[in-house]
Image: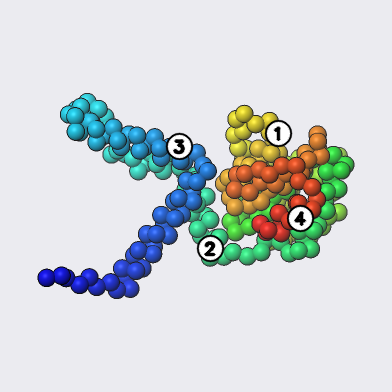
Amino acid sequence: MIEHIVVDWRDLLDIGIVSFLLYQVIQLLRGSRALAVVSGLGILTFLYFLSRALGLYTLQWLLDHIFTSLFLVIVVIFQEDIRRALGEMGTKHLFQHKALRASSVEDVASACEEMSKARIGALIVVERGMHLDDMIRREGVRLDARLSRQLLRNIFHPKAPLHDGAVIISRGRIAAAACILPLAEAKGQNFGTRHRAALGITLETDAVAIVVSEERGEISIATNGVLSRNLDAGRLRTVLNDVL
């Protein structure tokens, strides 16, 4: 006799939540160092079952103790990735909004274009879903000023007192200047401090960072820990409008 399987709304909700969580984990692992760590854990898992099958008691004892504290190991290894993923889940899907109006995007793009031609270095961070209030309070000089092309130019003028560090734009206003950002590792890459800071802040948050190189006048933009370099003014406007 064939039994009929009854599926109610709780089962569908359960499957939907698990599928969503698995999708977020896959998105987290794609293109990150986490994938290499997961591969290493997969090798350890294979060795564990192999040691049990072949009776390798010493190896099995060692792996037993490793897997006992596996959850703590994962939290320690992936603490930055977990924090960023949870932050994105809490803001990107629930509270997503336009980070900048079209006029503000034009102000940022025009200022970067002018500073590029004048070989003035700059680092501009635009807040998106994840708030940067903690970083604003901890580092830099609070301004809370109206965003304008002229003010950005003045802040990053080489002789201005606030030209070192980053400008943080929050809720469409210049929230703070001279901010110190976390630096990302750049092994094998010829990145300066501004580029490493842009990568660092976009690895930890969903912010967008624009860099103007004072040596080459090159404009770069960083999102999600990926740096796009050598943008012209038109391309910069297109990218900013797309991501913001």
Which residue, given by chain and number where applicable, does mark 1 sit on? Answer: 192
Identify the mark nearer the N-term, 4 or 3. 3
Q: How far across and down, in percent of the image, does residue 43 sit?
A: 34, 34
Q: Please state which amino acid type lies under the numbered disc 4.
A: Arg
Mark 1 element type: loop
Q: How far across and down, in percent of the image, does residue 67 sit?
A: 29, 38
Label 3 neighbour load within 10 Å: few <14, some 14-19, many 20+: few
Residue at 81%, 34% (x, y): give it.
Answer: 215
Which residue, given by chain and number where applicable, does mark 2 sit on? Answer: 93
Q: Please state which amino acid type lies under the numbered disc 3.
A: Ala
Pointer 4 with pointer 3, Cβ within 8 A: no
Which residue, given by chain and number where applicable, does mark 3 sit on? Answer: 36
Residue at 60%, 56% (x, y): give it.
Answer: 131
Q: Is residue 205 visible?
A: yes
Mark 3 element type: helix
Label 2 neighbour load within 10 Å: few <14, some 14-19, many 20+: few
Identify the mark nearer the N-term, 3 or 2. 3
Residue 237 is marked as 4
Identify the mark nearer the N-term, 1 or 3. 3
Q: For the residues marked 1 and 3, what is the alpha-carbon distance in whole angstroms?
A: 26 Å
Front position among marks 2 and 4: 4
Q: For the residues marked 2 and 4, what is the alpha-carbon distance in whole angstroms?
A: 25 Å
Identify the mark nearer the N-term, 4 or 1. 1
Q: Please state which amino acid type lies under the numbered disc 1.
A: Gly
Q: How far across and down, in percent of the image, does residue 74 sit?
A: 39, 41
Position of 129 relative to 2 (above/below): above
Front position among marks 1 and 3: 3
Drawn side of residue 24 relative to residue 101, left or right: left
Q: For the residues marked 3 and 2, what is the alpha-carbon distance in whole angstroms?
A: 28 Å
Q: Please state which amino acid type lies under the numbered disc 2.
A: His
Q: For the residues marked 1 and 2, what is the alpha-carbon distance in whole angstroms?
A: 33 Å
Quadrant showing the N terminus:
bottom left
